[in-house]
Image: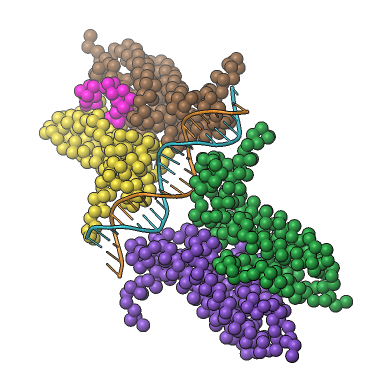
Chain colours: A purple, B green, C brown, D yellow, E orange, F cyan
Amino acid sequence: MGRYPKSERSAALIVQSALRVLARKGHARTSLHDIAVEAGMSKGAVHYHFPTKDALVRAVLEHACDTVARRTLEAWSRGNDPLSALRAAIEELWRVRAERTDEVRVIADLLAHSQHDATLRPSLADYYRYAAAQSHEHLMKHLVAAGLRPRVPAELLPRLLLGLLDGLLMQVFVDPDALRHEDVVAAVLAIATALFEPATP
Amino acid sequence: MGRYPKSERSAALIVQSALRVLARKGHARTSLHDIAVEAGMSKGAVHYHFPTKDALVRAVLEHACDTVARRTLEAWSRGNDPLSALRAAIEELWRVRAERTDEVRVIADLLAHSQHDATLRPSLADYYRYAAAQSHEHLMKHLVAAGLRPRVPAELLPRLLLGLLDGLLMQVFVDPDALRHEDVVAAVLAIATALFEPATP
Amino acid sequence: MGRYPKSERSAALIVQSALRVLARKGHARTSLHDIAVEAGMSKGAVHYHFPTKDALVRAVLEHACDTVARRTLEAWSRGNDPLSALRAAIEELWRVRAERTDEVRVIADLLAHSQHDATLRPSLADYYRYAAAQSHEHLMKHLVAAGLRPRVPAELLPRLLLGLLDGLLMQVFVDPDALRHEDVVAAVLAIATALFEPATP
Amino acid sequence: MGRYPKSERSAALIVQSALRVLARKGHARTSLHDIAVEAGMSKGAVHYHFPTKDALVRAVLEHACDTVARRTLEAWSRGNDPLSALRAAIEELWRVRAERTDEVRVIADLLAHSQHDATLRPSLADYYRYAAAQSHEHLMKHLVAAGLRPRVPAELLPRLLLGLLDGLLMQVFVDPDALRHEDVVAAVLAIATALFEPATP
DNA sequence: TATGAATGAGCCTTCATTCAT
DNA sequence: AATGAATGAAGGCTCATTCAT
């Protein structure tokens, strides 16, 4: 701790500041100047650490994906019995979205941007793959262990779950009152369980 | 009235051109110059018909939402028996997304932008409301008529369906090969049916 | 009356409207569009009557100079004895300025502009010459008739008087409370009379 | 501090260049591009030092007012006896105007502009106040010391003097041959002295 | 490692002017 | 006599980037 060279500390500071500004103003309206001000440095300093704006944005995206992925991972380690674990996970997965963390907002913003900037896609693809893999693992562990088996191809399960949550989030973006927290959790849980049926012996 | 029909034709031409350019380059990278070139007019002419870039973008968004909503409406009017109608609708709803129409891409782009530009939200909120209302009506008509009743609050049904499809689309944006068409349709259909249970008499 | 062809009436309407807008917004910030709107016509119509913006502005300037000159003329036809006539004239000459008529404001604005647009100078020079000639005539008639003779070259008298009033007006432009009406009139009157001495027989 | 003295030098260079261009072309026809070219810099550099065109113009105006005020101040420190001091001052005050320095032209131009741009007024009001205060002080010192007292309110004296000079200048703007230098000086001197009378003991 | 200065391309917008109708 | 449509040249401003220090 504190052992990092100044360079690394500054770079990290810039990424954090950029994340905040990007969440607040969006990629299109964020200038390097804004980021430099937020970080308390000069524009030149930002360029010293990140050769290009795109490079910085990429770093921010990776950081944001990491953070969300980590929180997703934790989401699955709660609850005792399979069902309550699933419920807790869904609740946490929705919460991390509904809270509209800086990270979540930046990811949503850059995901749209990635349609026209291919360099952003790898991070996002990794993120989806990783999140899906995690969810897949836990879904299988919990539910199959409970004597259930999926009604759809197993590798599709997590993608459906995450897609559903992300899609609902978009509706909240547009109209914050469109969905109630409990309703979403209950409905997603219903869907999740409905995707399994008793395994025939 | 009608003395100068050229105006309406030009305005429509500008909106179409703008839609194309926005789909290709995204809101952030699209300039009025690009749009003017695409429309074969001068920048001044664009400003003559739309006082501001924002105004034009809003017009494009409304047009795109209309178009997609209309296609969504048609999606529900196919098939004979309830189940095949549902299947046809889901297939069409996914196709309109997976095809990545200009309209769909622009909507996705502007939806992200709407996080930081409140003036875009009304059109999008209308769009979601309208699409949800349509889906709600047909879902109830088809499935309830088939002696089923929803396992979740009825008004949530279409939001879940559309959210799921939109969320899956985002994964395709990032990684075009992440999902196969048939898989998606089958899975969404499974989910949709799983959301109903026989109505107890 | 009413016998003018439409063309002339429209042209006059445009000049009046332009005067109002120019007084309100200043030459630099006035567009032909503003003037057309004020006149309730289209931009094209304005161009029909005045081939160029400069031509219109020149017409407005002439009109304004005429109006002010006419009022100046009237200013000298009041009062009975020489001194009260002089007092009345000065009071009116200051009032027409201090009121900040549209005409006065436009003249002030265009006078500054004339430094860089020589085509405006003739009208203004005419105006000054004409106003000076009027004032000269009356000053001489009134005061010389009263047995006085000027202390400075006679042809300079009106230029001094008008210059003084105009210069004081500029101070009011910058700070409306800089000068009180009565003070100005009294002081200018004092100066005017001090410029004469009893004619030695 | 002083690590980057180039900044101050550049800012000053820009102000000087802007003064020249404004004097030559007038506020309305002067673009930042013109100023940048005159300064031998890029448009961006101008914006680096002055965030806005208005800000730059304000800086130029203050600079011009300062310069003229300083020269006015010097005008009063010449001559030995009261009368020759007054004469010298009037001569210099007229000269600084009749020379049509860049500063004087810019002040006249912006004064007209200030009718529609309130942000310019404070500088001009200060300038008039300051010049009036200076003139007031010297007028009183010289003339009252010579046993004279004003015929009009004392605080009006300098405003009358400066107003007269400024007003005459406007006539010269419009018609350079309207007034001869010696005539003006003699007449203004006559007026100035006529404004005083022997103090009764 | 970081800063202030400067660049230059591009963007949105305004506006006088032209022209077919 | 007048209108709506369209043009094209600026204009002010933003911003990523470069560079000497």
Q: Position of residue C20 (x, y in %)?
A: 50, 31
Residue at (47%, 65%) from the top-left corner? A119
Q: Residue C192: x and y, percent?
A: 31, 22
> What residue range appears in magenta?
D164-190
| Quadrant the N terminus of chain B occupies | top right
Q: Quadrant of residue A138?
A: bottom right
The image position of residue D93, as x and y in percent, is 22, 32
Q: Is residue A153 magenta?
A: no
Principal SS element in the magenta part?
A: helix
* C7 left or right of D83 in image: right
Of the pair A72 and B37, the residue shown nearer to us: B37
**Closest to the observer, D121 or B85:** B85
Residue appearing at x 54%, y 31% in the figure: C43
Q: Residue furthest top?
A: C201
Residue B176 seen in render:
yes
In the displayed structure, does residue B192 sit left or right of residue D49?
right
D169 vs B58: above or below: above
User: From the viewer's perspective, is residue A45 above or below residue A196?
Assistant: above
